[in-house]
Image (cartoon, helix red, strand yellow):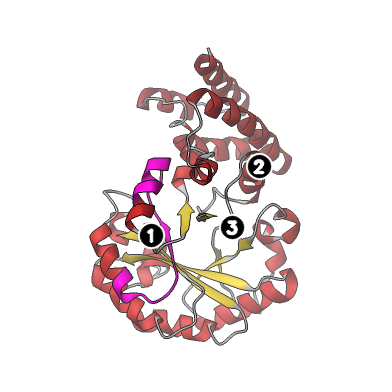
Amino acid sequence: MPKLWLAPLHGVTVYTFRNCLFRHISGIDATIAPFVPVQSTATLNVKKWKDLLPDNNKETVLIPQLMGTVPSFFTDTMNALHDELGYTHFNWNLGCPMHPIVRKKRGCGLMPYPDDVEAIVENACKLPFKFSVKMRLGLHSFNEGLEIANRLNQYPLEFIVIHPRLGDWQYEGQPDLEALDNFLGQCQHKIIYSGDIFQLSDYQCLSKKYNQIQDWMLGRGILRNPFLASEIKNTSELSEKQKIENFNEFYEDLVASLLEVRSESGTLASLKELWHSFAHIYRLNENQIHNLLIIDNLKDFLEETTALQLTINN
């Protein structure tokens, strides 16, 4: 049986979304939270990070993800998250390809600097916690990922989550499985595969090719089909009718959950972000998506999405 992970999608897979998701689906075994910045002890107040508070995460096994470049800040942040919130496993985001992050030499932007990468991992592995890395195959070149893989082999990482694209590609093009094969040939750590698992057949093809991989991370695929994890575990797809019915129940709960912690404008912003992906469930075309996303108040937005649901159901 595969182990399935919910990916850390910044600003999207936050606790309100996660908890609602887990009330309506099965199949996800563990979650990596969207990243928080590492900070020095002088500036830290981890209790402000609501997304990581244990009371907000009773539905899943959660691993905090850290973002940063200063080894001592990793020490301070990991110790604080352990002492105040009880966490014992931390993941490092070495894979974010977004330009504002990369320009600051964070996320994937640090991959061309293997000395800096190794310094952070070496420091983190001295602490009495579990440590793992989420990364790409490189920023500009596959050689960057191979160099880092070889450097990290000597450290006791729990696992490496690998997304088989370069950072320069963002999310365009196809994952490069030949380059991934080369990476797997160099890396001695346990691997979690992440990237472009959008439907059951995607998982089946990849798991057949990589039978040595037992852990799989679902991100954008879960947003397009919240029931993907259960389909993978059950080795069968839901009918379109059942998928829509289940989604409508999930969506109603999600709206209510968002309104409990956010203003109407904040809820609308969150829903618009999600409907870029939810649109796939209803097979909306570009014009329909555009017309939905230009709605500027929550009442009208909810009326429109309800109308979409009724149209599909009829």
In terms of sequence position, does the residue under pointer 2 or pointer 1 come before the other? 2
Seen from the viewer's position, the closer of residues 151 and 292 is 151
Snapshot quadrant of residue 164? bottom left
Amino acid type at image mark 2: Cys
Q: Nearer the viewer, mark 3 or mark 1?
A: 1
Circle on res. 20: 2
Q: Nearer the viewer, mark 2 or mark 1?
A: 1
Residue 294 in sight: no
Circle on res. 211: 1
Q: CA distance from mark 3 to mark 1?
A: 20 Å
Seen from the viewer's position, the closer of residues 129 and 42 is 129
The segment highlighted magenta reads 184-205
Q: CA distance from mark 2 to mark 1?
A: 32 Å
Q: Residue at x 37, y 66 (%)?
A: 108
Q: Is residue 151 above or below residue 34?
A: below
Snapshot quadrant of residue 168? bottom left
Point out residue 100 in the picture as x, y percentages from the top left corner: 40, 59
Q: As drawn, which residue projects farthest toward the top? A: 314
Label 2: how many residues lie within 10 Å, few (<14), some (14-19) or many (20+)?
Answer: many
Was residue 188 drawn as part of the magenta stretch in this picture? yes
Point out residue 294 in the picture as x, y percentages from the top left corner: 47, 28
Was residue 233 drawn as part of the magenta stretch in this picture? no
Residue receiving disc 3: 30
Label 3: how many residues lie within 10 Å, few (<14), some (14-19) or many (20+)?
Answer: some
Q: Residue at x 40, y 66 (%)?
A: 135
Point out residue 189 in the picture as x, y percentages from the top left corner: 42, 74
Q: Is residue 135 above or below residue 11?
A: below
Secondary structure under the numbered disc 1 in the rendered image:
loop
Seen from the viewer's position, the closer of residues 38 and 234 is 234
In terms of sequence position, does the residue under pointer 3 or pointer 2 come before the other? 2
